[in-house]
Image (tube, rainbow, N blue to C red):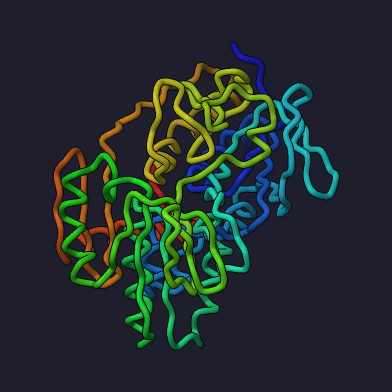
């Protein structure tokens, strides 16, 4: 039998913790284990609805996960404060206030932060992650009459955000345009059928693509590319992938080349098994996985069961990774394109299906927070 912990600390209010918090709290209460949830924000955006919100299809309130009522109902101590460092040797989480939280086991679900290597020289530049600052930044677009917006990064997230921002400008009658900048030779690298379906959609919307070129600097009203050219850009949105939270990168975990801590089949750090890792903040130890919210959601069941197993002193459960994940690009106009395992489906029915899935998730979380039956399914 494993020794039962006295303190579980959940660091981050991400999608995995959103789904796993209640079953973890129930198991902990049954075995006299204290649970603390630590996050600098009490509300977190649901990533699946971020492009739709950027497009104006949803209000900001419709896509926010509110952890305060859920934590209160579950009897979990919610500490709304940013963590700044981890002491893996002494098993401590250091907070901005100087407080140090002890843990027997730590679960980290802090997401990733958009890479922001683009040099800023007075340009108006904003990464899409963290999402709350991005949404607040978008609110400043309300009174802008004319705008040119560059989206840097031509992967799935960049294409979807370009379509969303174009729809936002059109919906509000703003003049200007949106264009994509990508260092690769094509959009959605490694997904040729997806790219083939998305190119005509981008063309119909007048969203041009500057591919095979790296953005080097953002100046007031302009974006500079590595070939020396400059293009009008009143706003620059970064969809250039994510980097790990510095507290993880500097803690001393075994990591991949980018600094993401490795986790194993039980969602434990391969170097520090008293730390569990989920979502975009970590890397699968076998081979790379896309940074996608779908994996964070799929890990919730395993994390909840393993936290319960720790409380009971029982054996852990392995996570089963299905890499054939579904990617859906919302056009911002109640139309979507779905891709899975090389197959592509597009149309308004795809949008309605995605909208139903997203609203079901949010409704389930809201019911769970109120204590009604039928919360998010694990």
Q: Quadrant of the C terminus?
A: top left
Left or right: residue 164 versus residue 17 is left
Quarter holding the N terminus?
A: top right
Residue that appears at 29% across and 43% down = 189
Give the camera-side residue of 241 and 213.
213
Name the foreground residue: 190 vs 20.
190
Residue visible at 26% across and 72% down in the picture: 333
Left or right: residue 194 compared with residue 272: left
Quadrant hosting residue 348: bottom left
Q: Nearer the viewer, residue 237 or 101?
A: 237
Instruction: Residue lying at the far right in this picture: please name it.
Output: 98
Residue 125: x and y in percent read 55, 64
Residue placed furthest toward the front: 228
Task: Please give left or right for residue 79 compared with residue 135 in the image.
Answer: right
Q: Give the vertical position of 279 relative to 209 (above or below).
A: above
Quadrant hosting residue 162: bottom left
- Give me the residue at 46% from left, 22% from top: 285
Task: Relative to 128, say whether 333 is above or below.
Answer: below
Task: Measuring from the top left, give residue 325's x and y in whole percent.
Answer: 28, 40
Q: Is residue 87 above or below residue 83?
A: above
| Mark count | 0
Pinpoint residue 56: horizontal percent, then vertical percent.
38, 75
Q: What residue is at 26 percent from the left and 48 percent from the top?
A: 186
Residue 22 shows in the view: no
């Amino acid at each position: 039998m494993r020794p039962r912990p006295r303190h579980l600390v959940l660091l981050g209010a991400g999608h995995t913790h959103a789904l796993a918090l209640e079953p973890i709290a129930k198991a902990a209460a049954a075995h006299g284990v204290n649970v603390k949830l630590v996050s600098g924000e009490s509300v977190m955006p649901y990533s699946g609805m971020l492009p739709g919100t950027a497009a104006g299809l949803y209000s900001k309130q419709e896509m926010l996960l509110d952890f305060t009522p859920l934590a209160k109902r579950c009897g979990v101590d919610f500490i709304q404060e940013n963590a700044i460092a981890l002491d893996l040797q002494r098993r401590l989480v250091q907070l901005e206030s100087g407080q140090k939280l002890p843990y027997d086991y730590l679960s980290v679900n802090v997401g990733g932060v958009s890479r922001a290597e683009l040099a800023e020289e007075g340009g108006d530049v904003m990464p899409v992650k963290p999402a709350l600052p991005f949404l607040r930044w978008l609110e400043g677009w309300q009174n802008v009459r004319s705008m040119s917006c560059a989206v840097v990064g031509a992967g799935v997230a960049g294409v979807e955000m370009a379509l969303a921002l174009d729809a936002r400008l059109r919906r509000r009658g703003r003049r200007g345009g949106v264009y994509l900048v990508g260092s690769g030779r094509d959009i959605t690298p490694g997904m040729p059928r997806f790219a083939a379906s998305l190119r005509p959609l981008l063309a119909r919307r007048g969203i041009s693509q500057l591919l095979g070129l790296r953005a080097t600097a953002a100046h007031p009203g302009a974006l500079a590319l590595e070939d020396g050219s400059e293009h009008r850009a009143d706003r620059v949105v970064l969809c250039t992938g994510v980097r790990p939270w510095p507290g993880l990168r500097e803690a001393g975990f075994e990591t991949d080349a980018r600094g993401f801590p490795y986790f194993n089949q039980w969602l434990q750090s391969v170097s520090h098994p008293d730390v569990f890792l989920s979502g975009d903040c970590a890397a699968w130890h076998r081979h790379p996985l896309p940074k996608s919210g779908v994996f964070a959601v799929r890990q919730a069941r395993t994390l909840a069961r393993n936290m319960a197993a720790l409380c009971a002193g029982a054996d852990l459960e392995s996570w089963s990774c299905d890499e054939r994940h579904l990617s859906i690009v919302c056009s911002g106009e109640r139309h979507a394109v779905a891709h899975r395992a090389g197959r592509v489906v597009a149309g308004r029915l795809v949008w309605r299906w995605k909208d139903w899935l997203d609203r079901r998730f949010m409704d389930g979380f809201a019911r769970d927070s109120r204590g009604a039956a039928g919360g998010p399914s694990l």
